[in-house]
């Protein structure tokens, strides 16, 4: 693109070394996250076909109420979680744009300081609001709750990630919000390791059909991941970049998840 512009302006092409020095001097970065393909496309296609067949079987679990079988649009729930981390991706030590390691206090696993959980329906999204998981113990104090929107639910966990007790609390809260006597379809690719046998039985007893998106297929069929969290994270990282620029310099700024 740069060569094309230079040709149009009839100017000399800039030196690559000069451009590298320019990036370092002004703390600019052209780094772009790379999304690696977890499984091949044929494998993903086969897994998604099985997933859709299971959805069709679930739709025949009760009397037909619409074009989705026993489910109405307000009965289909899509739930997913996304981390909020201090800097960069969730798995690797971050290198900033001048090739210096960001100093992060504590263990690298502690970079996650919050998790946001969203639950969407084709109709009736007002029933279930966002959920935030923060690092800590206990409950949000009345004074602290004023900082959140009225419909935001807050939980505290030791590592700000969902665990078995929190998943049980979440499902109790979720069921209270959506119970209307009709069967529900609960679609997720998160928290599967925290769905205990007791919780699965409880969901069945409450008329909830549990459906898990196949591993490696999230980027194709998980609505929240492809259309909501991607845009949300881009905005979040822009805000983080602005904070670091205003409160830097980065080499002296210590980040903490506590």
Image (tube, rainbow, N blue to C red):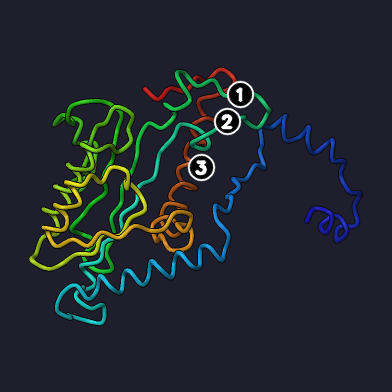
- Of labels 2 and 3, earlier in sequence is 2
**Residue 100 at x, y = what percent?**
65, 24
Question: Which mark is drawn over residue 94?
Answer: 2
C-alpha separation, residue under disc 1 versus residue under disc 3: 20 Å
Label 2 sits on a secondary structure element that is loop
Quadrant of the rendered structure where residue 175 is? bottom left
Which residue corresponds to the image point at 28% horizontal and 40% vertical from the top-left?
132
User: Which quarter of the rendering shows the N terminus?
Assistant: bottom right
* Marks 1 and 3, the one that precedes in the sequence: 1
Q: Distance between the residues labelled 2 and 3?
A: 16 Å
**Is residue 101 or residue 98 the one in the foreground?**
101
Mark 3 — residue?
238
Residue 103 lies, with reference to residue 70, above or below; the image says above
Q: Residue 175 carries which label?
A: none
Residue 75, percent across and down? 20, 67
Query: What SS does tag 1 mark?
Result: loop
Q: In which quarter of the image is residue 248?
A: top right
Rendering coords of residue 142 (x, y %): 13, 31
**Left or right: residue 183 compared with residue 251:** left
Q: Quadrant of the C terminus?
A: top left
């Amino acid at each position: 693109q740069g060569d094309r512009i230079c040709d149009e302006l009839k100017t000399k092409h800039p030196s690559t070394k000069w451009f590298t020095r320019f990036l370092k001097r002004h703390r600019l970065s052209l780094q772009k996250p790379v999304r690696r393909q977890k499984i091949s496309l044929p494998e993903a296609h086969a897994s998604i076909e099985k997933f859709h067949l299971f959805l069709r079987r679930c739709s025949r679990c009760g009397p037909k109420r619409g074009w989705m079988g026993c489910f109405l649009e307000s009965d289909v729930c899509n739930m997913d979680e996304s981390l909020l981390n201090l800097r960069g991706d969730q798995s690797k030590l971050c290198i900033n744009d001048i090739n210096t390691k960001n100093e992060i206090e504590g263990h690298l696993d502690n970079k996650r300081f919050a998790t946001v959980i969203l639950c969407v329906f084709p109709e009736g999204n007002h029933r279930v609001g966002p959920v935030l998981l923060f690092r800590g113990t206990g409950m949000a104090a009345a004074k602290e709750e004023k900082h959140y929107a009225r419909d935001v639910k807050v939980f505290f966990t030791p590592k700000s990630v969902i665990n078995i007790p929190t998943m049980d609390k979440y499902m109790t809260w979720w069921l209270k919000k959506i119970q209307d006597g009709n069967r529900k379809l609960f679609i997720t690719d998160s928290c599967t390791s925290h769905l205990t046998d007791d919780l699965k039985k409880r969901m069945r007893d409450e008329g909830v059909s549990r459906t898990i998106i196949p591993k490696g297929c999230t980027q194709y069929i998980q609505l929240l991941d492809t259309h909501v969290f991607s845009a949300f994270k881009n905005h979040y990282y822009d805000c983080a970049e602005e904070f670091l620029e205003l409160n830097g310099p980065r080499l002296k700024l210590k980040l903490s998840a506590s």
